[in-house]
Amino acid sequence: MYFSVEVDTGLLLGYIAKAYYKHNFNEILSGKLVLNKEYFKNLFLYDGISNLDTIIKTIELEKPDVVFLDFVQNLNCPGASEYEKMTKIAVDIQQMAIRNNMVVFSLSQVNNDSRNKDGASTTLK
């Protein structure tokens, strides 16, 4: 199960397919390389969900083996500061993973303010 808060599922599936087939993405789009959808039948991609509670409820309902949460810093979550918000997200995800005995990869990035700025991509928040 893959939750992407910032990237749409079509683009995400394209990159996963590119990595799996090790071919240029344009070959997949143009039809030169046929995508075997059977290989991805157990992969559930979600985008457009920006609320932590909704993500946790979906995970607990579907009970996947592995979960990837992408761009966690963009989730809507109560907190007086960015630190409090990220702490709540981390604790809630950890508790959910323990409760459901599952593996969760929580992916983040450098802060949004530094994206696309020269040299700033190596500075973590």
Image (tube, rainbow, N blue to C red):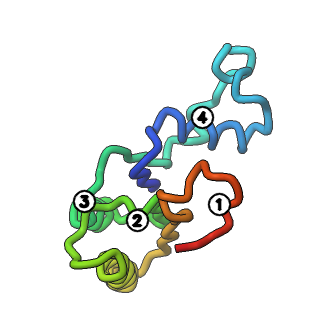
For marks 4 and 2 on the same chain, the one whose residue lies earlier in the sequence? 4
Tell me which label, 4 or 1, sits earlier in the chain.
Answer: 4
Horizontal and vertical percent for residue 90?
A: 39, 80
Secondary structure of residue under mark 2: helix
- Give the labeled residue for mark 2: 73
On residue 14, which mark appears? 4
Q: What residue type is disc 4 on?
A: Gly
Q: CA distance from mark 4 to mark 2?
A: 23 Å
Q: Nearer the viewer, mark 1 or mark 2?
A: 1
Task: Determine which quarter of the picture holds residue 36.
Answer: top right
Q: Are marks 3 and 1 in contact (CB under 8 Å)?
A: no
> Residue 28 sits in which quadrant?
top right
| Residue depicted at 41% across the width and 64% down the height | 72
Q: Which residue is mark 1?
A: 121
Type of the residue with mark 3: Asn
- Examine the rendered structure and indicate whether residue 22 appears above or below residue 29: below
Is residue 63 toward the left or the right of residue 124 in the image? Answer: left
Image location of residue 97, percent across then percent down: 39, 79
The residue that disc 3 covers is 51
- Label 3: which secondary element: loop
